[in-house]
Image: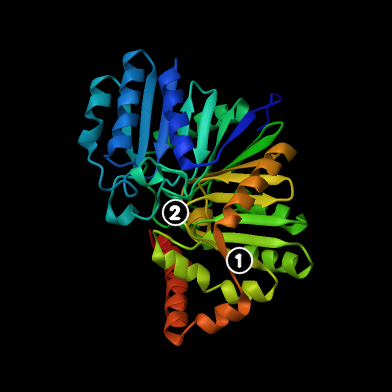
C-alpha cells in the first residue's frame, strides 16, 4: 500500500521525554485516542495516563486501550473502571490461557486523531521515567505525523479487533497474513505476527544489511537469526564498520546470557561490541547507512517470528544523522568488549550458562510456540 503524502518525524531521545509528549498529545486530542501497550502498571505514571484518557473520553474523544494480558499480568481489570464508566473501551490482548499463552502483543503505540503517533520500546511504568543515564531505563522512540500515523491507527484497529482471537493450534506453522508492510513517500511500516511465510520486516533488514557500508545497532535483547548473524559477520569481514550496543544491565538475565553466547564468533569477525552501563538498556535502534529502523521489535527470534511487533523504516539523511548522534551519546556510556579480555574472563561455568540460555531462547521457546 502506498501514499503520496509525506510524514513528519521527531526523535524522542529518552523514554521520559516520550511519556511527557504522549500525555500532552492525549490532552490535546479532539477525535480519537488509541493506546496499545505490552506493559502497563498501576503506578503514579499509569494513573496519570488513565486520568488523561478519562478526561479525553469525557470531552467527547473516542478512547480505546489495548493491553497485553501477559505483559501486564499484575494489572487488574478494575484499574480501567473509571475509563469504562466514562464510555471508553478497554480490552486485554490474548487473555491468559495455557494453550494460547505464548503469542503476545509486544507493540507500543499511541495514535491521536489518526494524525499523530508515537512508537518505540518504552512501556507505561515508573522504570521508563528518566533519561536512561541518571535515572530510568535507557529507551527511545519516534513521534510520527502524517500517512504513517494513519497506517498505525489502522493497525491498531485490526489488533483491537483480534484482541480475543482464538489462535488456531500450530499457528506458528501456518502461513501468516499478519506480516505486512505499508509504504509512504519517506517511510515504511512493517507489522509482524506469528505464522509461517515471508516476514517483510526480516527481509528488509537483511536486504539493507547486505549493502550497508556502516552498521550501528542498539538492541536490548540480542539473539538474531542465523541468517542475520551471518550477514553481520560477512559485512564486518568485508570491511564495513559494525558496532553493537547491547545490554550491560538487563531485566531478563536469560536474554543477556544467550546474547553473550554469540560474542566470541562476532568479535572474531571484527564486530565491535559494547555494553551499556548506567541503567538497564531497553532501546531498539538499527542504523544501516542512512536507513533507520525504530519500533518495538528486538533482534531476537521472539520479536521476528512469534510476537506481534512493528518497525518503522526511514530513509531520511537528517533523521539518520540524528540517530547517529543518539548512538554516539550512548556509546560514551558503554564499555567495549575486547576479544582477548572476553575470552580470559569466561569460566567453564559461565560458558555453560550462556549455552543453556541460548538453547532455551533459540530452540525451546520457538518449539513451544510451534506446539500452541
Q: CA distance from mark 2 to mark 1?
A: 35 Å
Instruction: Using the rendered view, name the quadrant where residue 243 is placed.
Output: bottom right
The dot on residue 227 is none
Quadrant placement of the N terminus? top right
Q: Is residue 335 left or right of residue 137?
A: right
Return the residue at label 1.
273
Quadrant where the image shows the C terminus:
bottom left
Q: Secondary structure at mark 2?
A: helix
Q: Position of residue 33 (x, y in %)?
A: 42, 24
In the rendered image, the residue lying farthest to the bottom is: 348
- Vertically, is 32 above or below 100? above
In the image, what residue occupies the spot 47% across and 50% down? Answer: 133
Query: From where the camera sits, is residue 316 visible?
Result: no
Where, by quadrant of the figure, is residue 182 drawn?
A: top right
- Mark 2 vs mark 1: which is more N-terminal? 2
Give the foreground label among 2 and 1.
1
Of the pair 48 and 66, the residue shown nearer to us: 48
Of 115 and 301, nearer the camera is: 115
Q: Residue furthest left?
A: 78
Residue at x-position 22% and y-position 40% = 76
Q: Position of residue 183 (x, y in %)?
A: 67, 35
Q: Is residue 249 left or right of residue 226?
A: left
Residue designated by label 2: 171
Amino acid at each position: 500500500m502506498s501514499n503520496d503524502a509525506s510524514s513528519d518525524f521527531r526523535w524522542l531521545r529518552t523514554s521520559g521525554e516520550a511519556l511527557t509528549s504522549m500525555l500532552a498529545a492525549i490532552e490535546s486530542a479532539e477525535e480519537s485516542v488509541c493506546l496499545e501497550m505490552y506493559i502497563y502498571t498501576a503506578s503514579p505514571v499509569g494513573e496519570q495516563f488513565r486520568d488523561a484518557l478519562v478526561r479525553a473520553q469525557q470531552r467527547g474523544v473516542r478512547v480505546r486501550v489495548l493491553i497485553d494480558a501477559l505483559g501486564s499480568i499484575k494489572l487488574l481489570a478494575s484499574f480501567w473502571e473509571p475509563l469504562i464508566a466514562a464510555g471508553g473501551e478497554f480490552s486485554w490482548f490474548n487473555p491468559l490461557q495455557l494453550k494460547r499463552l505464548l503469542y503476545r502483543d509486544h507493540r507500543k503505540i499511541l495514535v491521536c486523531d489518526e494524525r499523530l503517533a508515537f512508537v518505540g520500546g518504552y512501556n507505561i511504568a515508573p522504570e521508563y521515567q528518566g533519561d536512561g543515564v541518571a535515572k530510568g531505563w535507557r529507551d527511545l522512540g519516534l513521534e510520527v505525523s502524517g500517512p504513517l500515523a494513519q497506517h498505525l491507527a489502522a493497525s491498531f484497529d485490526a489488533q483491537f479487533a483480534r484482541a480475543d482471537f482464538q489462535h488456531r493450534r500450530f499457528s506458528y506453522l501456518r502461513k501468516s497474513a499478519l506480516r505486512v508492510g505499508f509504504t509512504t513517500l519517506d517511510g515504511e511500516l512493517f507489522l509482524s505476527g506469528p505464522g509461517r511465510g515471508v516476514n517483510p520486516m526480516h527481509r528488509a533488514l537483511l536486504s539493507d544489511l547486505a549493502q550497508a557500508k556502516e552498521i550501528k545497532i542498539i538492541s536490548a535483547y540480542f539473539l538474531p537469526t542465523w541468517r542475520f548473524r551471518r550477514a553481520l559477520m560477512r559485512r564486518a569481514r568485508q570491511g564495513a564498520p559494525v558496532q553493537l550496543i547491547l545490554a550491560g544491565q538487563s531485566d531478563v538475565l536469560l536474554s543477556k546470557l544467550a546474547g553473550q553466547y554469540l560474542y566470541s564468533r562476532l568479535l572474531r569477525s571484527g564486530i565491535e561490541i559494547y555494553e551499556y552501563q548506567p541503567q538497564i538498556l531497553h532501546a531498539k535502534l538499527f542504523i544501516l547507512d542512512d536507513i533507520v529502523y525504530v519500533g518495538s521489535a528486538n533482534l531476537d527470534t521472539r520479536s521476528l517470528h512469534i510476537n506481534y511487533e512493528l518497525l518503522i523504516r526511514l530513509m531520511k539523511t537528517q533523521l539518520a544523522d540524528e540517530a547517529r548522534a543518539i548512538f554516539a551519546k550512548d556509546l560514551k556510556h558503554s564499555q567495549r568488549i575486547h576479544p582477548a579480555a572476553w575470552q580470559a574472563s569466561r569460566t567453564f561455568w559461565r560458558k555453560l550458562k550462556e549455552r543453556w540460555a541460548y538453547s532455551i531462547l533459540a530452540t525451546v521457546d520457538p518449539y513451544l510456540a510451534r506446539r500452541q
